[in-house]
Amino acid sequence: MEISKLVEIESKMLKIEITRGRNEIASLTEKLQLMEKLDTQWNPQLGPVHTNLEAGKSIAQNVASQSLSVLRNMKIHNLRNSAAKRFGCLQCGKSFRCFSQLEIHQRSHTGEKPFRCTLCGKRYAQKGHLYTHQRTHTGEKPYRCPICGKGFIQKCTLDMHQRTHTGEKPFVCIKCGKGFTKNCNLKKHLAVHLDPSLNMYGTDSGASAFNATLINGTT
């Protein structure tokens, strides 16, 4: 059996975890670039601050390594990295190892959402996303915390919840080193670095005030 075919079959169970892991790493790369720009803006008279940049890169590399923990099956991960990406998108040039992955990606350009919820009519580009949505109607919560018993609709939500028990904070600010359990909280924290005026009440309370602003939809 061809490597690409083997990857297509075996990766179905891990598609969500693998995609999420890659998105986390891509996000970290963007944040590192952002911090490099911030260093230049904050210290125009000093020029590039190489010491801070090197420290930021080191932290980003460490967090990227932690993000790879979501790739449960290392055999499939290695196959995916070694297999040729033979299927390219004609619109943006992005390549994929499986034609089925290319088909799903192309829907992001066309807006096609072929999978429709029979209960509320909401549509989705991927069948797996429809299945997840349908649990909001049925109340099914197949992912249960082994520590407290709380149930969740998605595995990724369970993973985030378990960090409240373990204290794990895999999302680390490459500017100051502060860790967070959720990527969204890191993004809010980075916004305070971008605009220190948002942090009006000290580090923690200022971030909380900014979070409340986002939730309320005000500026």
Image: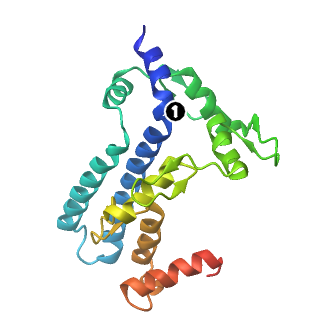
From the top left corner, tell me how far across and down residue 172 is, in percent: 32, 63
Q: Quadrant of residue 73?
A: top left
How many numbered marks does the figure carry?
A: 1
Find residue 22 and report its horizontal and vertical position in percent: 41, 43
- Horizontal side of 17 relative to 93 (left or right) equals left
The residue under label 1 is 94
- Rendered image quadrant of residue 160: bottom left
Q: How is the image coloured?
A: rainbow
| Up/down of 125 relative to 191, above or below | above
Comparing 32 with 156, the one in front is: 156
Q: Residues within 10 Å of mark 1 (few under 14, many from 20)?
A: few
Point out the residue furthest to the bottom here: 201
In front of the other: 119 or 126: 119
Q: Is residue 43 above or below residue 127?
A: below
Q: Residue at the location (49% across, 21% down)? A: 8
Q: Can residue 89 be seen by looking at this rendering? A: no
Residue type, mark 1 in image: Lys
Closer to us: 19 or 60: 19
Q: Is residue 209 left or right of residue 203?
A: right
Residue ID at (37%, 44%): 70
In percent of the image, x 64 and y 81: which residue is there?
218
Picture layout, residue 23 above or below residue 99: below
**Quarter placement of the N terminus:** top left
Q: Secondary structure at mark 1?
A: loop
